[in-house]
Image (cartoon, helix red, strand yellow):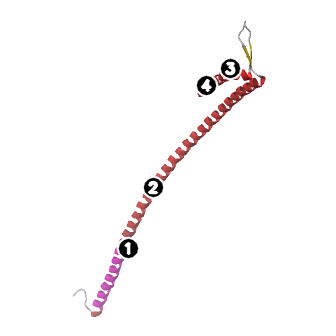
Amino acid sequence: MMDNLQTSKRKEMLKVLTSAGLVLLTLKSIGQIDTKTQYNPNKDSLVTIPKQIAVWMIQDIEKAQSYAEEIKLLSSNIEYKTDIIQKQDTIISIQKSKIQLKNQEIDNYLEIVNEQELQIINLNKSVAKQTKRKRFWRVTAFIGSALVGLAVHYHWKNGNSWQD
């Protein structure tokens, strides 16, 4: 639709420029120098334009048409490249959102790892406390059994019986 509008505007502009060129060439100031007027009382007067000027006008019209085609091709090229850029922008925004999601997942995993490290530290402290308690009771049991053994041995050696 844009191409039709631009094409019709170009055609109108070409017609206006051609008409303006012809009008300028028929002015008396130009006409007296470059044109010859043949007067015929029965018909309108004819204005003759030198062949070279007519050739230049035709060349200008052909150039204008080729420029219009070139503009059309360049416009389609720009539209194509704009479409590619929009697709690339879409891909970039999708990739950025994926990166954001991955960064959020990494942050979540880091939080979980930090929590687990704190739990490991607390469990290590708890294990250390339990180990100290076990060691205390082992030492106490060993010392207690040694004292009971000494007491039994002392009573046996001194002749004290348990039955007395």
Is 6 placed above or below 120 here? above
Q: Earlier in the sequence, mark 1 or mark 3?
A: 3
Cα distance between the residues tagged 2 and 3 = 85 Å
Image position of 25 (left or right of 94): right
Using a 10 Å C-alpha cutoff, classify the residue at mark 2 as few (fewer than 14 neighbours), some (14 to 19) or many (20 or more): few
Asked whether the residues under the numbered discs 2 and 1 touch, taking CB atoms below 8 Å apart as contact, a structural biologist would say no
Q: Position of residue 71 (x, y in %)?
A: 65, 32
Which amino acid, by three-letter code, is at mark 1? Thr
Local secondary structure at mark 2: helix
Cα distance between the residues tagged 4 and 2 = 59 Å
Local secondary structure at mark 4: helix
Image position of 141 (left or right of 8): left
Image quarter of residue 7:
top right
Cα distance between the residues tagged 3 and 4 = 31 Å
Please report the residue visible at 40 percent of the width from the left and 67 percent of the height from the top.
121
> Closer to the camera, 97 or 65?
65
> Closer to the camera, 2 or 26?
26
Image quarter of residue 160:
bottom left
Q: Which residue is mark 3?
A: 28
Q: Which residue is mark 2?
A: 107
Image position of 27 (left or right of 142): right
Local secondary structure at mark 3: helix
Nearer to us: label 3 or label 4 = 3
Q: Which residue is mark 4?
A: 9
**Which residue is outermost to the left?**
164
Nearer to us: label 2 or label 1 = 2
Which amino acid, by three-letter code, is at mark 3? Lys
Magenta region's main secondary structure? helix
Is 35 placed above or below 161 here? above
> Closer to the camera, 44 or 7?
44
Q: Which residue is mark 1?
A: 131
